[in-house]
Image: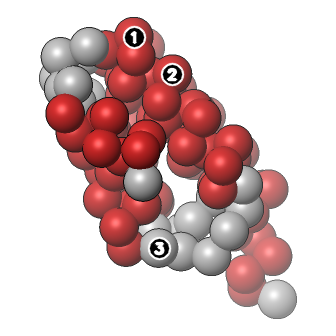
Amino acid sequence: NELSSFIYSNPEDDTQIARAIQLFDITLGESSFNDSYFEIYQFCLSHPISNVRRAAMFAAAGVGWPEFRPVLERIRDSDPDLELRRYANTTLEAMQINHWNSLAV
């Protein structure tokens, strides 16, 4: 996948990585869980630059996989950027309402 290759090959270009992960989200939509794609999201959600983590959270919310829960909880509980902690909490709440509540039915 060209987007994943770009993300891994340009780890310091935060603006372009943020754009790429958003395009990745548009490409995937609400598709079934995929380990390879999840690794890309994890890479971006753990990126040292907060702009990339923010874009990855936005993209993760669109995909809605429950596997994001522990990653987003980690960001909510321990990210150095307090604004991102709040955003992670909001993202978790939105994913619970929009994606995960239907899984319990």
Q: Residues within 10 Å of mark 3 (few under 14, many from 20)?
A: few
Residue nearer the viewer, 65 or 39: 39
Q: Residues within 10 Å of mark 1 (few under 14, many from 20)?
A: few
Q: Amino acid at mark 1?
A: Thr
**Cα distance, mark 1 to mark 3?**
25 Å
Quadrant where the C terminus sits is bottom right
- Horizontal side of 66 relative to 81 (left or right) equals right
| Residue 75 in sight in this render | no
Please give the residue where the numbered disc 2 appears in the rendered image. Answer: 19
Examine the image and state in which quarter residue 50 appears: top left
Which percent across, then down, holds residue 49? 24, 16
**Residues under numbered marks 1 and 2 in contact, where contact means CB atoms less than 8 Å apart:** yes
Please give the residue where the numbered disc 1 appears in the rendered image. Answer: 15
Please give the residue where the numbered disc 3 appears in the rendered image. Answer: 34
- Above or below: residue 47 compared with residue 84: below
Q: Amino acid at mark 2?
A: Arg
